[in-house]
Amino acid sequence: MVASGHPKPKSNSAIAVEKLRELIFAGILPAGSNHLESELALRLGMSRTPVREAALTLEAQGLVQVQARRGVRILPISIRDMEEIYDVLTALESMAAGQAARQNYAEEELQELQQTIVDMEDALDREDREAWAAADDRFHKELVRLGGNGRVATIVALMADQVRRARAVTLYLRPLPLKSNADHRGVLEAIITGDAERATRIHSAHRSASKKTLMQLLKQTKLHML
């Protein structure tokens, strides 16, 4: 049988996951709030079954807590969790940067990493923080891919949602991340020249500084728990 070439339609539960994630990241479903499945189903215009399935998926991702007879609680951002997550990301991504520098990549193989930096710089010129954040996400994902360790990529991906959410809360509280962009370009240059030690060192310092900034900003908000 010849495949039609059309993508398989998304299930209602997958659609519910996407919509609920959007509402959580936009702050429409704020941290610490509680919502009945019936309320969420009405908001999404679907039955309770896919909403329940979506809630369980989001619970596994660390975004919500499913409570018997009390519905779904949008979890606050835990400072302790974020400290642990950034410690893991610092170690794994810095290792990936060093591994990428050892791969002797051709210039064309580093075009996506280069483009993410260009996009970040363009976004900062426009003071478009959301565009910068999207390009920053692409940079870190591509850096890990270039490191060539699939297990590292899997572990980092598991933490991506919580990092994205914490950054969304603090994105407009921090100064423009000009130093962050300089760090990204430094990592790229180290990969191009094959300097694994420098790539590792720059990225480790970059992630450590990002962690310090994020922790300070989270402590200024009321959207976290210890």
Image (cartoon, rainbow, N blue to C red):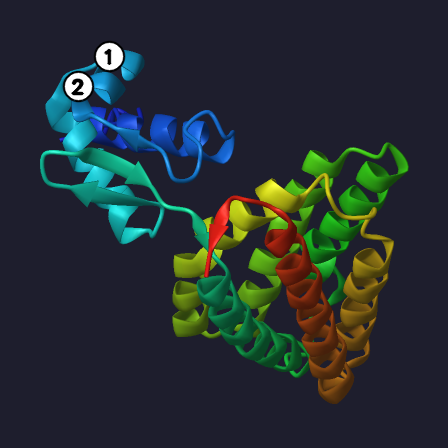
Q: Residue at x 80, y 38 (%)?
A: 123
Q: Secondary structure at mark 1?
A: helix
Q: Which quadrant of the structure image shows residue 151?
A: bottom left
Q: Position of residue 26 (x, y in %)?
A: 51, 29
Of residues 123 and 170, the one drawn nearer to the viewer in this rendering = 170
Say if 166 sits above or below 189 in the image.
above
Q: Residue at x 59, y 74 (%)?
A: 90
The label on residue 42 is: 1
Q: Residue at x 26, y 47 (%)?
A: 59
Apparent side of residue 36 relative to residue 102 in the rendered image (left or right): left
Apparent side of residue 2 relative to residue 223 in the rendered image (left or right): left
Q: Secondary structure at mark 2?
A: helix
Real-space Cα separation, disc 1 to disc 2, in angstroms: 6 Å
Crowding near the residue tagged with mark 2, few <14, some 14–19, many ≥20 C-alpha atoms within 10 Å: some
Residue 115 appears in the figure: yes
The label on residue 53 is: none
Residue with the mark numbered 2 = 38
Q: Position of residue 186 (x, y in %)?
A: 83, 69
Of residues 77 and 196, the one drawn nearer to the viewer in this rendering = 77
Q: Which quadrant of the structure image shows residue 71?
A: top left
CB-based contact (under 8 Å), mark 1 and mark 2: yes
Q: Residue at x 50, y 30 (%)?
A: 27
The amino acid pointed to by label 1 is: Leu
Q: Position of residue 138 (x, y in %)?
A: 61, 50
Q: Which quadrant of the structure image shows residue 200?
A: bottom right
